[in-house]
Structures are given as structure tokens and as C-alpha cells.
Image: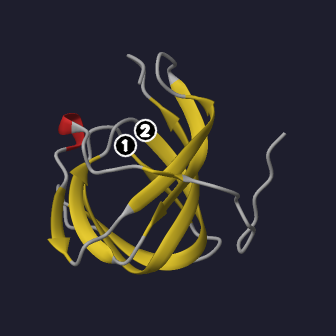
Amino acid sequence: MRKYQPGDDVGPLDFWPFDNPASDYRVTRGAPETYGRIDVGGAGHTTRFGIWRCTEGAFDCTEQGDELMTVLSGRCRIIRHADGEVWDLGPGDTLFVRDGSRVTWDVSDTVTKVFFGHKAEGY
């Protein structure tokens, strides 16, 4: 069993470069860096659960998989390109994003989130 709460130390994370062509990453502010870890599932599975962290900056991307996320620390704004809807997230906030959504992540304070993702055709 895994349990995370806002402010928890999530342990070591690996550097995750902006290199997935399907996500079509475009950095729009600063030089954000991302780190993460898959705790369950991942490549070859239809679900995955893990931790993700992003330093200050902004980028656009296409989300890969339906994802339920909860922010553990930091602050960010997510903007959905399709309709301009905006979510301001901080510790304890939860958001669901659909597979294929084009979004902007604008990180004002390094964000760490826990996530559960599902992609019917697999990751």
C-alpha cells in the first residue's frame, strides 16, 4: 500500500526529460525540469501510479492518458487549450485531466504530485 499526504517526503525521483514526441512539449517560460517515478504499472500496462515533480517554469503538452492527480506540494496553474478553463492548484488539490488534452502547466513553486493514469491502449 502507498499513502502520500501533502508535504510528505516522496523519496528519490529520476530525471524525466521533455522528450516524448507524443506529448509535443513546448517550454514557454523559464527552464522547468521534471522528475518522477512509476510505483505501479507503466510501460506495457494500461494503468500507472507514481510521483511527478516539476520546477518553476511553464510548458505546453498533450496529456498521455486519463489522469487523476493530487498536488502534494508547490503551486501551479493548468490551462486547458480546448476551452481556456483554468485550475489553480496547491497542496491537497485534486484534478482529473483527459487523455489527449492539450494543456499549459505554469509552475510558480516547484510542484510535486501523486498521479494515477489510465490509457486504454497502454503506455
Q: Nearer the viewer, residue 52 or 5?
A: 52
Identify the amino acid type marked 1: Arg
Q: Residue furthest bottom?
A: 108
Left or right: 59, with 26 as reference point: right
Q: Is mark 2 in CB contact (under 8 Å) with mark 1?
A: yes
Q: Which residue is drawn at 70% across and 58% down?
A: 11
Please say whether residue 102 is visible from this viewpoint. no
Q: How many labels does the image show?
A: 2
Residue 104 vs 61, above or below: the answer is: below
Circle 2 SS class: strand
Quadrant in which the N terminus appears: top right
Residue 72 vs 30, above or below: the answer is: above
Please say whether residue 57 is visible from this viewpoint. yes
Q: Nearer the viewer, residue 120 or 56?
A: 56
Task: Please report whichever mark, 2 or 1, sits nearer to the chain's N-terminal start.
Answer: 2
Circle 1 SS class: loop
Q: Position of residue 75 (x, y in %)?
A: 48, 79
Residue 11 vs 119, above or below: the answer is: below
Q: Which of 86 and 105 is in front in this view?
A: 105
Q: Mark 1 points at which residue?
A: 98
Q: Position of residue 54 (x, y in %)?
A: 43, 66
Q: Name the residue under label 2.
A: 66
Q: Where is residue 36 in the image (x, y as percent from the top left)?
A: 51, 51
Q: Which residue is drawn at 55% across and 66% down?
A: 112
Identify the amino acid type marked 2: Asp
Is disc 1 surrounded by few (<14), some (14 to 19) or many (20+) residues within 10 Å?
A: some
Residue 83 vs 42, above or below: the answer is: below
Left or right: 21, with 45 as reference point: left
Left or right: 1, with 77 as reference point: right
Is disc 2 surrounded by few (<14), some (14 to 19) or many (20+) residues within 10 Å?
A: some
